[in-house]
Amino acid sequence: MFQSLSDRLSNSLRSISGKATLTEDNIQDTLREVRMALLEADVALPVVKDFVEAVKQRAIGQEVMKSLSPGQAFLKIVQAELETVMGTANEGLKLATQPPAIILMAGLQGAGKTTSVAKLAKLLRERDKKKVTVVSADVYRPAAIKQLETLAAEVDVDFFPSTPDQKPVDIANAAVAHARTRFSDVLIIDTAGRLAIDEEMMAEIAALHKAINPVETLFVVDAMTGQDAANTAKAFGETLPLTGVILTKVDADTRGGAALSVRAVTGKPIKFLGVGEKTAALDPFHPDRLASRILGMGDVLSLIEEAEQKVDKDKAARLARKVKKGQRFDLEDFRDQLQQMNNMGGITGMLDKLPGMGNVAQMAQQSLDGKMFARMEAMINSMTPEERRRPEMIQGSRKRRITRGSGTQVQDLNRLLKQHKQMQKMMKKMKGGGMQKMMRGMGGMLGGAGGGMPPGMGGGPGGMPPFK
């Protein structure tokens, strides 16, 4: 996420962060590089100008000059100003109203509105324990209503049906009445998008807003469109009283221009980030954490929160007890670990949030086959319970049966068994307080010939190539 911006800024700031003294000259050189990094990231020009000027004014003031380590103080200023540009703190949804609290979703076609409706419904149901109803007022796209119905069933929320021959205002009013009878806490209304902003679309959504008076009007925008995202949000904001923005496809955006421009251009807070296709891939937006990630300092707080919400505590506790007693780490345990890792966005999602691991995450993304975990799980599922408990018995005909059942190759299975064996050895080192030994072992693997990658992520000795 925002990898090119992160790389450019990190390189620009590395040259100054170690300096014992700061002069106007070396500050100017660094700020020139920062300005170029932001412009290349497609950040809006007025935002870049204000940002650089704010950093400069603070950097040449007493705050830095009197600091014991001016370079570090300069880095803190850049981080603080990044946070200011994106908004000083996370702004949640304001749902304190007589139920149902109505959320209206607006945006252009293809921005990911319908998927965001389902993601938000899931988040509100699971995190905030809200009873949610969703409805589609998109009567122009034939598959929109069916798509939302399918997603609503997937995230287990109430779906109110509508038909293409109805008027959007009638659909919304009927959905409000339905949500009241169902005692729903929240009603989320999906609206029609267009390929571009047009007067007819704006008039329709303005009429819809006036009819239902939502407590939250969220603009859904594709981060990949960069500076255009901020301009589109501004145009919508002039027609609708927006309360916030959901930035989608952030995981695929290496530049970060939209995240840095939207708040400054529209004056509206980014409330959520869409970070993947899965219905769980919606994160509350924390400007301080994102600023830290952009500067290569990681986002451990979000990683901890994800672990709290997405890791199966019972399975984790069971494995911890097993390891402590020195019992075998079998393939069922291995499958559980793969599933837990997948729930947290896979290896790349986790590495991306660790300090200084952005490049490793990028390398992992390039060398890992996206479907690798699914194939590994399929192979383990194709084994008998006995084979999962005793992997050493998997030979000859058993290998052929497992690979036929999972649609994989024998070499894929061999790699899986080798990877499991390595994990098993690491788990043994954890027995009886051997955590330090295990960490040393992992350090050796990370520093091996696999390009600084853990086993299974890079080629060469100590690392296995990805599944083909």
Image: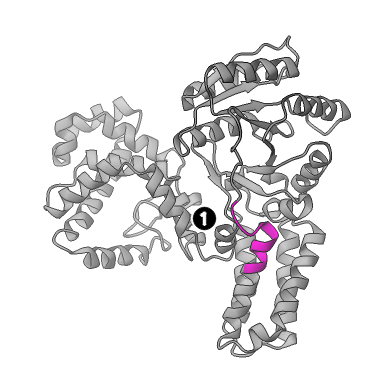
What residue is shown with label 1? 362
Q: Residue furthest front?
A: 98
Tag 1, which secondary structure? helix
Q: Position of residue 407 (x, y in %)?
A: 35, 28
Which is the main secondary structure of the residues drawn in magenta? helix
Q: Is residue 400 left or right of residue 171?
A: left
Nearest the camera: 401 or 88? 88
* Percent of width and height locating residue 32: 75, 74
Task: Please tell me which residue is depicted at 32% across the width and 28% down the height of the picture.
Answer: 406
Give coordinates of residue 298: x percent, y percent: 50, 62
Instruction: Please tell me whether residue 327 is drawn above or below residue 203 in the rendered image.
Output: below
Residue 87 part of the magenta segment = yes
Point out the stretch of residues depicted in magenta: 80-90
Which of the 4 quarters of the picture holds residue 134? top right
Return the residue nearer the eye: 170 or 332.
170
Side (left or right) of 220 relative to 277: right
Q: How is the image coloured?
A: one colour
Magenta span includes 236: no
Q: Is residue 467 visible?
A: no
| Residue at 18 percent of width and 64 percent of height | 434
Q: Residue type at mark 1: give it.
A: Gln
Asked where in the image residue 141 lies, by quadrant, the reply is top right
Farthest residue toward the right?
199
Q: Position of residue 160 (x, y in %)?
A: 58, 16
Identified at 28% across, 49% down, the residue is 419
Residue shown at 17% from the left, 63% from the top = 433
Would residue 181 be found to the left or right of residue 47 on screen? left
User: Foreground: 95 or 115?
Assistant: 95
